[in-house]
Amino acid sequence: MPVAPRTIADTGTDSAMLSDLAARTLMQRGRIRLDHAAAALKLPNSVTQELLEGLRAHRVVQVVGHGGVGSEVQYELTDTGRDFGREAFARCQYVGPAPVSLEAYCDWSRRRSIRHQRLDGPTVRKAFDGVVVDPIVLDQMGAAMNSGRAILLYGPAGSGKTFLAEHLAGLLPGQIAIPYAITVGGEIIQLFDPLIHHPIEAARSCSLILGNEDRRWQQCRRPVVIAGGELTLEMLDLQFDHATRFYQAPPHVKANGGLFVVDDLGRQRISPRDLLNRWIVPLDRSRDYLSLHTGFKFVVPFDLAAVFSTNLQPAQLADEAFLRRFGYKVHLGPMSAEQYRRVFRQACDELEVQFDKAAFEWLLVERHLAQDRPLLACYPRDLIARIRDFALYESRMPIVTCDALDRAWNTYFCTPGQVQPSAI
């Protein structure tokens, strides 16, 4: 974790911005103890006291009562301070941990880059223990992750591309410190997202004992961001809220230090070519260029494992020259009968449905083979779930039988010529 600042100057953040933030905090909280204000701003008590005493010198805040000592001293806004607070809210409504500087964020990202990580075969196999994946595919994925280049997973729908992409997060060792917010050009960009960044409280508790960590950063598991058909080019830019007057970081910035998955490439509202053109420089140079609404441009790290999955053939996405921008292209197709059986058994165990070998063999021959239906990874759980659904409906134990599989199959696939009961 970065080391805690000892003075306002050490924060790397403009003192006027910190004064505004402190005033907004007091406007929101009312009377507040020094240590509580420090906790809200995620700054050391000494830095918070320096900040509040500076405001006190300008008659923005005042000390309340006479019994407070040290961290128990209480502050509140004066009448002048409330006017100052309203003006601060008019400029920006962000209230929360003090932001870190862009320079500090970029420097820390470089030192803790995901590209410093190296994987080997045993590590990859351990991360995928219990997951049914072709060993050849695992080796390809491990090498691809070491390359630091973009990965394209392609194959038919239901072959497990999204599932595999999500599990790649298990190949990212260690933890990463995420700042709650950063400041650029006098503006605040909120970066920490509780839906993406999952704190490691045990690690934080240990470091807090030492008292030397910068609490403006949160120690987290490496982030995983999955973007599907909703992805647009506009989402890859800073999102400025005209009401609150501060920014939200785009999803790929929130994914820094982790994994960014573009799921179902080719089904977005933007073409694959436009998306990849937007990311030519980031993918090649590990940095991206963003702009504030004022026109101020700046560089941020693009330090992540980028994975694209598609149901289309690569040739349908772009020409060969363009496809070379993907460092690795990994195909996921139908499973072998043995792999399919293992996935089927896992689904039975997970959903508490009794497995039957003879019924499973019937499924392979009489349904998959007879109807030329490939053995895709998505089928077992979906079929077993239907067997369980019917068993619950009929108040009986869920068991895999030929009849149960047949009924599940007929309600799962739209088979041409299949006779279905009339609704009348």
Image (cartoon, rainbow, N blue to C red):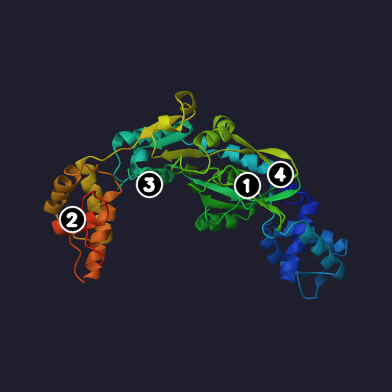
Q: Position of residue 390 (x, y in %)?
A: 23, 65
Q: How far is disc 1 from disc 3 in space, using C-alphas?
A: 34 Å
Type of residue at label 4? Leu
Dot 1 falls on a residue whose secondary structure is loop
Q: Which residue is under mark 2?
A: 406
Q: In the drawing, does residue 194 fall left or right of residue 92?
A: left
Point out the tag, 2 or 4, that comes first from the N-terminus.
4
Q: Along the polypeptide, which appears first: circle 1 or circle 3? A: 1
Specify the label residue 163 is tagged with. Answer: 3
Residue 45 appears left or right of 394: right
Answer with the quarter of the image where residue 320 lies.
top left
Instruction: Between label 1 and label 3, give the one nearer the viewer.
Output: 3
Furthest-top residue in this view: 321
Counting residues from the start of the chain, the first of labels 2 and 1 encountered is 1
Q: Which disc number belongs to residue 16? A: none
Q: Which residue is mark 4?
A: 292
The residue mark sitting in front, 2 or 4, is: 2
Given the image, on which type of amino acid does mark 3 rest? Phe
Q: Residues within 10 Å of mark 1 (few under 14, many from 20)?
A: some
SS at circle 2: helix
Q: What amino acid does circle 2 point to? A: Asp
Between 21 and 265, the one nearer to me in the picture: 265
Q: Which mark is residue 2?
A: 1
Earlier in the chain: of badge 1 and badge 4, it is 1
Relative height, residue 22 to residue 240 (above, below): below
Q: Disc 1 and disc 4: Cα gap in Å?
A: 26 Å
How crowded is the residue under tag 4: few (<14 C-alpha within 10 Å), some, or many (20+)?
A: some
